[in-house]
Amino acid sequence: MIDINYCKSGKILFYPEANRGATDYNSGAMYGELNYNAKAGYYEYIPADAEDCKLRVKKQGTSIIIKTLKGDCGFGYGVQADGSYPFKSSSNPQYIITRANKKVYFENTPPNRFSED
């Protein structure tokens, strides 16, 4: 699943959750800001703290398609973000509930202040 928030400031924040599935069921999530690449025609996620990560993010109907363009983006052992993620809601969500069951408000939490705990 994925949550995307269009902030009043113009930023687009997102929180995708991914899993590897059977047999070990590893999973991961990330919280970050999307930037539009006008030349390529899609959004990109390039985290400030990762040297080897770049994701392409495109809206397609009621889903978001994520494709890893470079490196390991830190979802966890053997977990990649690549795939189709349905929107949890058609409205602009104000917050997410993290995997640690923590409520995080998009407008109050920039990516550099986010903690899963």
Image (spheres, helix red, strand yellow):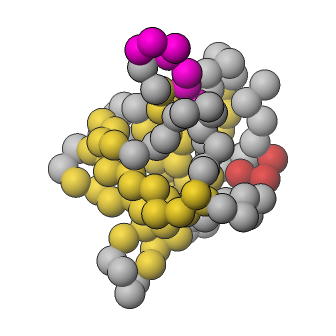
Q: Left of 49 or right of it: where is 70? A: left
Up the image or down, 9 lies above or below 21; here it is below
In magenta stretch: residue 77: no
Residue shown at 38%/51% (left/top)? 66
Q: Left of 76 or right of it: where is 23? A: left
Q: Residue furthest top?
A: 23
Residue 83 sits in which quadrant?
top left
The image quadrant where one finds the C terminus is: top right
Up the image or down, 14 lies above or below 49; here it is above
Residue shown at 46%/74% (left/top)? 36
Residue shown at 49%/41% (left/top)? 80
User: Between residues 88 and 20, which one lies in front from this camera angle?
Assistant: 20
User: Between residues 43 and 103, which one lies in front from this camera angle?
Assistant: 43
At which x and y percent is residue 3? 46, 40
Up the image or down, 6 lies above or below 90; here it is below
User: Between residues 39 and 26, which one lies in front from this camera angle?
Assistant: 26
Residue shown at 23%/44% (left/top)? 62
Write the start and end of the magenta stretch as one range. 22-28
The image quadrant where one finds the N terminus is: top left
